[in-house]
Structure formats: structure tokens, C-alpha cells
Amino acid sequence: MRILLVEDDDDLGNAMLRALRSRDHAVDRLADGRLADSVLRTEAFDLVILDLTLPGCDGLDVLKRLRSRGSRVPVLVVTARGELEQRIAGLDLGADDYLVKPFALSELEARVRALLRRGQGQSDPRLVHGALVFDTVARRLSVAGEPVELPRRELCLLEVLLGRVGQVVSKEQIAEKLFGFDDEAGPNAIELYVHRLRKRLGSAGLNIRTVRGLGYLLEEP
Amino acid sequence: MTPSAGADWSIRRRLLAWLLTPLLLVCAALLAANYVQARHTADLTFDRLLTASILAIADRVTVVDGRIEADLPSVALEMLSSTSQDRVFYRIGGPGGAFVTGYRDLPGPAAAVPGRIRFDDADYRGEPIRVAALARPLAPWGLEGEVRVLLAQTRGERDRLTRELVLASALRLLVVVVLAGLITGFGVRAGLAPLAGLQRSIRSRSPTDLSPITQPVPREVRTLVDAINQLMERLQASLDAMQRFIADASHQLRTPLAGLQAETELALREHDPAALRQALARLLAITRRTSRLASQLLSLARAAPQGGAPVLAALDLGTLAAAVTREAVPAALAKDIDLGFEGGAAARVDGDPLLLAELLKNLIDNALRYCPPQARITVRTRASEARSATLEVEDDGPGIAADQRERVLERFYRPPGTPGEGSGLGLAIVREIAERHGAVLTLADGAGGRGLRVRLDFPAPSGAEPRSAPPTAGADR
């Protein structure tokens, strides 16, 4: 995967460069905002990692120009803490994810992985979770290659959870996907479907945690 | 002159305007009155001469053979014209408007009452004149009707006298105005002198001198000076706090940096790969601690009063707490800790969302840090009857001994024997943010006397409306 890393600090930039290259990504590093802007005009990347405070041209401007050209390349904004909160709190600037400095390299790698996966989402309709593979177009589920039949609502619930692995999904969010306006969506109904999913797929490595008062979380495989 | 007349608005100018404008108006009115008076005086004086002359002329009118004849006395006319270049006109008319002698077209008062002299102002041959009119019946000569005598004099001499009188009073008024202006100017300056002194003494202060202004000031500016003194006191307090903070922060940052340096030097001396790995792991741990400390110092700086006024907006504490708790769930799962949330009805507070999120993050972070695996942490929000809101974080971990609960709120304080690598800032940040929101912070035992329960009671929001009403209702209706 081809990644553009825009980071002006040499120590951090080189460490990130080496970490990503060690994961077999083709990474180019730039330290100047204006240069990054002109490179992004002509070349295609699978992911852009963007610092906000850059010489030449502010990172936010690079991002704005990129989006104004209609590019949909995933962008991971990497920035110092106070800056993130003060400058972009509540603003949708078209970044796909934010990472606050200082961060663990493992965290960076995980975000990059997730964004690259999301970027492929349009071409690859499959959600893979350990031995589970869910085809979102055909709406078919298989465990270790064997097709598994699930009732419609359980399949729906599984899709919601698979889409947000490692994050808490609230009951309201689940109910939105599971039930239409006319359906009776009792609070116990979701618990029931979760219970059934656990029973059916627990052995296949599907671990759904109940988070008290907040919802459910599908653990990483 | 209104207070909004711009930046160049001055009390001195305002006072002068208010004092001098009425004075000038009064003087102008006096001058006008003096002019009227002077003209009247001049007329009185010269009308007496006119009276004497017209009587003399009238006395010389006789009727000879039924014809009116006037033998004009030169003395009478000279009396009038001798004093100046004033010219004299006369006209004598008979009954029925018949012209006898003099200036035929001389205008005069229409019907004079017999025996009484009437005076009038008129214009004749392009000059203003004063005309006297006298009518005498012709009965003594056995004739019907009356003889009418008009005697006119140009106003030159009268106007000269008027001017002299007016000029004299104008000079007196001018002296009054100038003197009053000078006195007012000096008076205003003297009255405002304490302000100028105050300005000088404030201006000559060194930028670091924030001691109160002690010089005596008039009662009118006492409250202003008091307000300035209070402001300076607060500034001093916040400067002191900032100084202390910088000193604390640099000290606290220097310690882990020294550790980093020492560990790095040791690692460089190491040749055994296994020992080197261990040293690097220690380096990573110290680095993590240092960056956590740095970010906590930043939160503290932002939460502290010198960080500027917080932006308090109406928000729902429950929604905010749920979102923050949700973000912390993965970290809790990684430690096998059961982190949950309990929130009922909307708990509205006036708060800064960033600071409140920071507060809760620190509380959850503390609980996660000190609770053993399988512990249970609950974040709870609720609203009371009085619409004040409560936020609680309760755990069943080791808790904090009762005699340490005050001290743990201090910056950089960690109870003796506390495990882990905390900075001692987490609860200090919580306290700062709570204080900025007027919330009451209480540390108590958790349920069943185990663990710790941190409780924050927020005051009711300022725009407290019935809870069911939409917050912006009314404005656009």
C-alpha cells in the first residue's frame, strides 16, 4: 500500500517511516506543507498521514485543498493534543481519523490498518473477523469456509458489530439498524438477539462484551 | 456631548462646556437687553430736544388773512443740528392735509392727538429718522381744523450714544467672561488634579508592581481605584499561581528526563542483547510516563484559572459522561476491568465540554490505574430535584485512606506506598476543573465500604427552566 507521510519533525517522521516500512508499506515522507499539496495534486496514494503544524502550508489547508479536489483518499491527522482540541474540536474537516501525539507505534499501525481496510471497502465487500467472513453484498456468512445460516435480525446485528470492532456500540445505534419505525423494539429484544448470536457463534471466536449502561463491544479476534 | 462621543471624551472638556456655555448665553442675553436699554436712553435724551424745538415751532405758527404762516425760529433748528451732522426736516400742514411749508413728503405719525407730541421711527431719503408730531387746533384764529407740525431728525447722534453705551457694557461683560473662563479653567484643572496624579503614579509603576494603589484619592474615584486594586490583587494571585505552576512543572518534568538520560546511558553500555532489551523496555516505560505527565500538565494549565475564563455552555452531563466512558471501555477491557455507566434523566449543567471530558477522563484513568483486574468501575450521572446534577465515579479497588483524601487533591502528591507510575496530577486536575464549574468534590468509600467513590455536585444551570421545556423555546416565536 502506498502511503504519504507528511511530518516535519525528523525524529518522529523517521521513526514513523521505519515503522510503516517494516509493515511492508511503500511510504514517502515530506516535511513541507506546500510540497505535500503539490505532490497530492499529481500522485495517487492509498493513505495520507498528515501533521497539522507544517512549514510552508498549514496541514488543515492541505487537507481542505485535497478534499476540494474531490479526492477521497483516507487521511489520518496526527497532531499534538491541545492543538487538536482547540483547532478542530467539533469541525468536520474531512479527516478520516485523528491520532494525538505522543502515541504508541502500535496504535499508529492499528489506525493505518483500519483506514486502509476502510479504503478498500468499496472493492471488497467482505468483513473478516477471525474465522468469520461476512459478505455484505450477498449477505452471506461463513465460519471457517462453511456457510452458516442466520435469521435476518441476527445477521443485521452481526453486521453492525463487525463494522465497529473494538468499539462500544450503543443499543440505540443497534436498534436503528435492526428495527423499522413500525417494529416493536423492546429493550429486551436486542439483548435476546445478542444472546442468540453469542450462543451460535461463540465457538467461532465471536466475543461480544456487554458494557454496562453503554451497549456492546465486539472484541478483536 | 454624550458619553458615547468616542474615545476622545474628557471630563475636563465636559465640565468646561457645561460651565462656559451657559455663561456665554447669559452674557449674550445681557448684551441684547443692554442694547435695548441704551437705545431707549438715547431716545429719551434726544426726544427732549425734539420736544423743545417742535413746541417752539408750533408757537410761531400764526394765521394771517386766513392763511397759515410759520416763521421758523432758526434757534430751534440749530439746537437740533448743532451737536452733530444730524440733519433736520420739518413739515407744517394745514387742515385737510393741506401742505403749508417744509418738506412736502416727510412721513409722520398719522393722527396726532391735539396738544400731545407723538414720536415715531421712520425712514426718509434713505436714512432712519426720528419724527415728532404735534397738532394745534386753529380755533384761536377762528378757523376750523388744526395745524400739524412734523419735526424729524436723523438718528446719527442717537445711534452714536447707543453704541457708546452698548460698547461700555460689552467691555464689562467681556471682562466677566474672560475672568470666569480663567477661573473655571483653573478650577476644573485643580478639581481633576488628583486624577492626573493617579495617572502619573500608575504610569510610573514597574510592570511587575501589582501592589494596591494607596495614595489618597477623592471620594468620586475611590470605587474606581478599589476596583483596580481588586483586579491587581487577582492578577497578582494568578501570576503567583502561574509562577508556582511553572516551577512545579519544570521540576516534575526534569525528574523523568533525568531518568531517561540515565537509562539511555546505561543501555548504551549494555552488550548483552537480553539486558539491552530490558533497558529499552524501561526506557519506553519512562518515556510513556513523561509524555503522560506533559499532557497532564497541559490539562492543568488549561483548567487553572490563569488559563482564561472557561466557556460555559449548557450541556447534558449524561451524554458527555457516556461518550467519555465509551471511549475508555477498550482500555478497561484490556485490563479486564468491568467499566460501566449508569445515567437516568438528563443532567443539565453549565460547563466547558472539553474541561468536563478531561475531568472524567482523569477520574476513569485513575480508577483503571489503581484497580486490580476484575474490578468494577461505574460512572454515574443523575439530576436532583433542584435541577443540580451529580457525577460519580465509583470503584471497588484499593480506595484512598480517609486521612489522605484531602492531600491527594494537591498537585504532585501521591500517598506513600502508592504503586504504579502516576504523576500525582490526576485529582489535582479534577479539583481545578470542579472549582472552575463551582462543583463540590467529595471523596468517599465505595459501596460496601470498599474502593473509592468520587462525587461531584454541580450547581443548577443558570438558565434553569423547567426540565421539559426546550432550551431555546421562545426566542424565535
Image (cartoon, coloured by chain):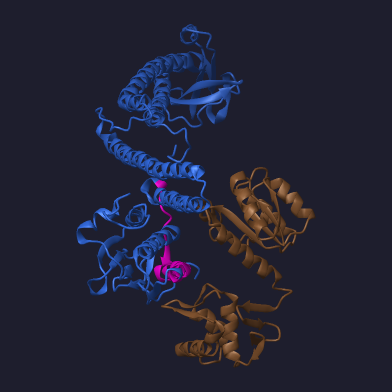
Chain colours: A brown, B blue
Residue toward you, B131 or B141: B131
User: Which quadrant of the figure has residue B449?
Assistant: bottom left
- Is residue A9 visible from the viewing direction of this image? no
Figure disc tally: 0
Most prominent secondary structure in the magenta stretch? helix
Residue toward you, A6 or B96: A6
Q: Position of residue A63 (x, y in %)?
A: 67, 55
Tell me the quadrant of the picture where the C terminus of chain A can be found: bottom right
Instruction: Identify whether B161 is placed above or below A8.
Output: above
Question: Per the image, is B314 magenta?
Answer: yes
Residue occupying the point 75% across, 59% down = A69
* Residue A39 located left or right of residue A172: right
Tell me the quadrant of the picture where the N terminus of chain A can be found: bottom right
What segment carries the magenta color?
B307-333
* Residue B470 located left or right of residue A164: left
Residue furthest right as drawn: A42
Residue toward you, A6 or B154: A6
Q: Position of residue B457 (x, y in %)?
A: 30, 65
Residue occupying the point 19% across, 58% down = B403
Question: Per the image, is B220 magenta?
Answer: no
Residue toward you, B161 or B21: B21
- Is residue B294 visible from the viewing direction of this image? yes
Residue occupying the point 27% across, 65% down = B399
Q: Position of residue B339 (x, y in %)?
A: 40, 72
Q: Position of residue B37 (x, y in %)?
A: 39, 23
Instruction: Identify whether B43 is placed above or below A66.
Output: above
Residue furthest left as drawn: B403
* Residue B351 located left or right of residue B448: right
